[in-house]
Image (cartoon, rainbow, N blue to C red):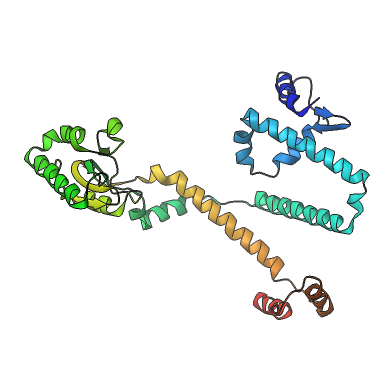
Amino acid sequence: MTLKKIFGTILALAGIAGTAFAGDDVELVKQGGTAVTLADVDGFLQQMPENQRETYLSSPDRVQQMLIGILRDKQLANQAIAMKLDQDPHAQAEIAFARDRILSRRRMNAYEASLQIPSMETAAKEQYLAHKADYVVPEVVDVQHVLISEQGRNDADAKALAEKVRAEAVADPAAFDQLVKKYSEDPSKASNLGQIRDATSSKLVGEFSAAAKKLTKVDEISPVVKTAYGYHVLKLIQRTPAKPQEFGAVKDQLIAKLKQNYVAEQRKAFLAKLDNGASSVNPQGMEAMRERYKLGEQPDIGAATKAAEKGSK
C-alpha cells in the first residue's frame, strides 16, 4: 500500500473501530514489514496535553498525517536497527536521555494526580470580596465615525474636509449615517456604516480610543482627530456602564485558578526537595566536560550546590 492510500484505510477502519478490534496490538496501517498499531498511536498522543487530543483527532487530515508520520518513523527506525545505528554510543545516550525525560514527566504527572486538593470555595469567596474591583465587566463605548484619508489630497485639504464633515455633523447629528455614506473613506463602512464597538479598546490606535473616551453624551460629536489612517470625526452611539460581576459568575473561574496555583506550589515544593538534597561535584568530571564541549569559564557548581544544601537546613 502506498502512503497516498492510507487515508482510505483510515476511513475503512473507522467503520469497525471499537467493535471487532480492541487490543493495543491491532494493526491500523501496514507497509512492507512495518505496521502502525493502536499502541503506537497511544505513544504519539502522549506527547500532547490530554485536553488537546480530542481536537487533534477531530481532523481527518491530521489523523492521516499522524499515521503517515508514525509509519515513516518506524520504517526508518527499523532501517537504523538493521544498520546497527542503535548501537552507536551517541544514539544510546540520546535514547537514554529521552527515556529519562519521559519517565520524569510521568513521575510528575503521578505526583500531581496524587494530590488531595482542598475545597477552594471559601478561599474563592475571600478572594472575590478582597478584590471586587478586579471582577467588573468594563465600560463599553460604541461610536460611529467618518474617515477622511490623505490619499489623493494633501494634509491641509484632508483636514479641511474633515472639519467640514464635523460642522455638518454638529448641525444635524441624526444625519450622521448620510455623512458616513457620502464622505467616509473607511473600506469597512459598507458592512458597518462606520460603527465601531468598544471604541476605547487598546486594540485601536491610541488617538482614536482617546477621542472616544472623551465623549459623554449620546450623539455628541468629537473634534477632528488625526491618526495614521487620516482624519476622523466621531459620534457617540452609546456608553454601556461598567458592571460588577456577582460572585456566582466568577466562582468557577476563581476556584480553577486557586487550584492551579495550589498544584503549582505543591509541585515547586516537591522539586525543591530534590534540588536541596545532598549532592557532590566531581572536579575531574567537570573539567572533562569543559574540555569536551570547549566551555569557557563556568560558575562554580560545587559552591552553588553547597549553598543549596545550607538553604535546605
Closer-to-camera residue (304/266): 304
Residue 220 appears anywhere in the view: no
Closer-to-camera residue (276/208): 208
> Where does the image place residue 128, in percent across and percent down from the top left?
39, 53
Place residue 16 in its image quadrant.
Answer: top right
- Which residue is at 85% across, 58% downward? 90
Report the residue that reaches farthest toward the left: 171
Closer-to-camera residue (115/145): 145
In the image, taking residue 41 as reference, residue 112 lies left or right, namely: left
In the image, taking residue 21 as reference, residue 143 lies left or right, namely: left
Asked if 115 appears above or below 3 in the picture, the reply is below
Asked if 154 appears above or below 283 in the picture, the reply is above
| Location of the C terminus (image quadrant) | bottom right
| Location of the N terminus (image quadrant) | top right
Asked if 1 appears above or below 308 in the picture, the reply is above
> Where does the image place residue 180, in percent across and percent down from the top left?
20, 35
Closer-to-camera residue (204/105): 204
Place residue 71 in its image quadrant.
Answer: top right
Asked if 28 appears above or below 282 in the picture, the reply is above
- Which residue is at 56% across, 56% downward? 262
> Where does the image place residue 154, in percent across and percent down from the top left?
22, 50
> Where does the image place residue 202, in percent across and percent down from the top left?
34, 51
- Which residue is at 77% across, 32% downward? 38
Q: How many labels does the image show?
A: 0
In the image, taking residue 122 as reference, residue 240 lies left or right, namely: left
Residue 165 appears anywhere in the view: yes
- Which residue is at 70% across, 77% downward? 298
Place residue 188 in its image quadrant.
Answer: top left
